[in-house]
Image (cartoon, grey):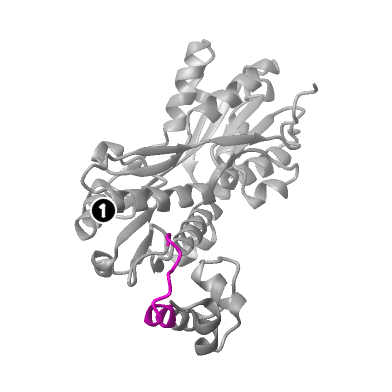
């Protein structure tokens, strides 16, 4: 049986490089051509490869609901894709990307697929008809009898609202984003709004006027709050806001600043996602940290389980937890 030294000699590489390639070291920087050469030589020499190596020719399709340009502007979905691809390469898959407007026809030839984002029922049907071995990341598809990985959207909202009440803040509002699927067939409903309503109603504190709904953009967050402040007195405005995304929160902060409303002295703010922007706003945003790369990695593991246990496999909904990160917009309570 061949050893690493023999493979390295035939490949013209160091033994260390050969070892790292065969063990799928994600930190190794070599060309795909070199990797393929090493694997081909290892196969020819009947080298015993690591057990977690994928079989030759196992291409994994990674479908992103965004265009490449849109993805660059949204750290949430970009980070999920990075998590998917790092895990996929670790297990020996060759990754093929498919963005919005790309033809998905080649997906049918992949060993399996990871679909990232929010899809209509029609889009879900199209993807799974091409490749039944598909795991969805970022959308609950369990009702469709399909495995999915999602972030916890209920517990963090309840945690934030309870925290506000513990601080004596009862005029609590929510800034929520909405949108539609790419084919425009379905509205994307944010379940955090239902959690907010149910919680606030249970405390007899729900006020419809304190729900600010718009598109997911800084401009929308700015307009929603600017318009509200034109119509309402400061003492009639929320003294605490839960904002469904850091993206919208950037606009919310600007609107409050222009209206001379201090954060957190007059309005405490906690946002969602904990993107890079959250740390660099003025003031820095307290935010719910979503573990997007972990979501992507769990999607790959779920797909492997599906592929290996097709007969007995039952669809799963995998929920990844969150953490509340305190910063200047809503400081942590003193211990």
Which quarter of the image is occupied by the N terminus?
Answer: bottom left
* Residue drawn at 41 percent across, 50 percent down: 301
The image shows residue 60, relative to residue 194, as above or below, that is below
Mark 1 Cα-neighbour bin, 10 Å: few <14, some 14–19, many ≥20: some
Q: Which residue is mark 1?
A: 123
Element marked by disc 1: helix
**Residue 223, percent from left and from top:** 57, 43
Counting the numbered discs, the total is: 1
* Residue drawn at 26 percent across, 53 percent down: 123
**Residue 309, percent from left and from top:** 27, 48
Q: Residue furthest front?
A: 1
When asked about the image quadrant of residue 284, the answer is top right
Q: Residue furthest right?
A: 334
The image shows residue 167, relative to residue 84, as above or below, that is above
**Residue 137, percent from left and from top:** 40, 48
Which quarter of the image is occupied by the C terminus?
Answer: top right
Residue 161 in view of the camera? yes
**Residue 54, percent from left and from top:** 38, 64
When asked about the image quadrant of residue 272, the answer is top right
Q: Nearer the viewer, residue 11 or 319?
A: 11
Q: Nearer the viewer, residue 242 or 147?
A: 147
Q: Is residue 46 covered in magenta?
A: yes
Residue 118 in view of the camera? no
Q: Nearer the viewer, residue 308 or 324?
A: 308
Span highlighted in magenta in the image:
39-52
Left or right, residue 152 beside residue 60: right
Left or right, residue 262 beside residue 319: right
């Amino acid at each position: 049986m061949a050893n690493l030294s023999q493979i390295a000699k035939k490949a013209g590489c160091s033994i260390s490089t050969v070892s790292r390639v065969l063990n799928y070291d994600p930190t190794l920087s070599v060309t795909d051509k070199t990797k393929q050469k090493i694997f081909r030589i290892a196969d020819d020499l009947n080298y015993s490869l690591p057990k977690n190596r994928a079989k030759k020719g196992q291409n994994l399709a990674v479908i992103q609901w965004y265009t490449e340009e849109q993805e660059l502007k949204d750290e949430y979905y970009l980070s999920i894709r990075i998590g998917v691809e790092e895990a996929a390469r670790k297990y020996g898959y060759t990754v093929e990307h498919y963005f919005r407007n790309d033809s998905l026809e080649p997906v049918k030839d992949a060993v399996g697929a990871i679909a990232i984002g929010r899809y209509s029922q029609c889009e879900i049907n199209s993807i799974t008809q091409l490749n039944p071995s598909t795991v969805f990341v970022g959308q609950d598809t369990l009702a469709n009898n399909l495995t999915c990985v999602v972030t916890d959207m209920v517990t963090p909202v309840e945690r934030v609202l309870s925290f506000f009440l513990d601080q004596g803040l009862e005029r609590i509002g929510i800034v929520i984003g909405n949108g539609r699927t790419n084919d425009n067939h379905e509205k994307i409903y944010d379940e955090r709004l239902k959690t907010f309503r149910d919680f606030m109603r249970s405390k007899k504190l729900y006020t419809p006027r304190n729900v600010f709904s718009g598109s997911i953009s800084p401009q929308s967050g700015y307009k929603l709050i600017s318009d509200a402040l034109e119509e309402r007195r400061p003492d009639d405005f929320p003294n605490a806001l839960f904002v469904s995304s850091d993206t919208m929160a950037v606009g919310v902060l600007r609107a409050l600043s222009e209206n001379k409303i201090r954060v957190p002295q007059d309005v405490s703010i906690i946002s969602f996602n904990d993107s890079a922007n959250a740390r660099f706003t003025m003031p820095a945003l307290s935010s719910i940290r979503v573990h997007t790369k972990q979501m992507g990695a769990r999607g790959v593991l779920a797909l492997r389980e599906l592929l290996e246990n097709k007969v007995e496999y039952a669809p799963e909904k995998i929920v990844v937890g969150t953490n509340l990160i305190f910063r200047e917009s809503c400081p942590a309570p003193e211990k």
